[in-house]
Amino acid sequence: MSKKSHLRGHEIEMVGGEWVYSDTKEPTVDNWMKRPCGYCNLHFTNEGHDGCLGTLPGVMNACCGHGNSNDAYIQLLDGTCIFKNDAIKLMDILSKEKEENRVIAGYKVEYAWFKYPHDKLAIRKKYFKRKLHARAFFLKKIQREHYYCARIVPILKEGTDE
């Protein structure tokens, strides 16, 4: 039985003394920077950060955990390291989005399809606290299934400018 593990949300295994992706059998050493995250399906940013995090203020480096909060960490510029769920909470705080005094409280994914046999438009909404989870849902559910239209909508906190 071969050794198995995970790398950036993808299952990997030891084959012939080297780690390879279980789905493609490509060596991880040559391809880990080329593949998107196996959880949110986002590529690294141009700066090399996890796509779902981007550049966080006051942070030396961080990892979202790629679907496993036990693997999440954040290292602040002073060298302090925070792990697991505490790291996820701090990432949420640091990545709060502000636009012209507007504060985003969460995200709504709206998607629609034609319901047969009457060809009526059916609409569903799903709510998320974090943009990371809204994007992951959008990429995994919405883009794989063929919906008529879909979008991610920020939800503004009450009392902020629109």
Image: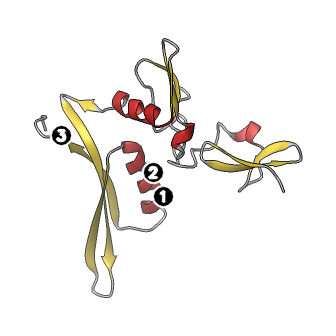
Q: Earlier in the sequence, mark 3 or mark 1?
A: 1
Return the x and y of residue 116 as percentages of the image width and height.
33, 84
Indicate left or right for 85 with 112 as reference: right
* Secondary structure beneath label 2: helix
Q: Residue at x 36, y 27 (%)?
A: 94
Return the x and y of residue 54 as percentages of the image width and height.
45, 31
* Secondary structure beneath label 3: loop
Give the quadrant of the N terminus: bottom right
Mark 3 and mark 1: Cα distance apart in space: 27 Å
Residue that carries the numbered disc 3 in the rendered image: 157
> Mark 1: which amino acid?
Lys
Residue that extends furthest to the top in the rendered view of this protein: 78
Residue that carries the numbered disc 2 in the rendered image: 136
Mark 2 and mark 1: Cα distance apart in space: 6 Å
Return the x and y of residue 5 as percentages of the image width and height.
70, 47
From this view, report whether residue 144 is shown above or below residue 3.
below
Residue that extends furthest to the right in the rendered view of this protein: 16
From this view, report whether residue 155 is shown above or below residue 116.
above
- Tag of residue 140: 1
- Mark 3 and 1 residues: CB-CB less than 8 Å, in contact? no
* Secondary structure beneath label 1: helix
Return the x and y of residue 16 as percentages of the image width and height.
89, 47
From this view, report whether residue 92 is shown above or below residue 129.
above
- Mark 2 and 1 residues: CB-CB less than 8 Å, in contact? yes
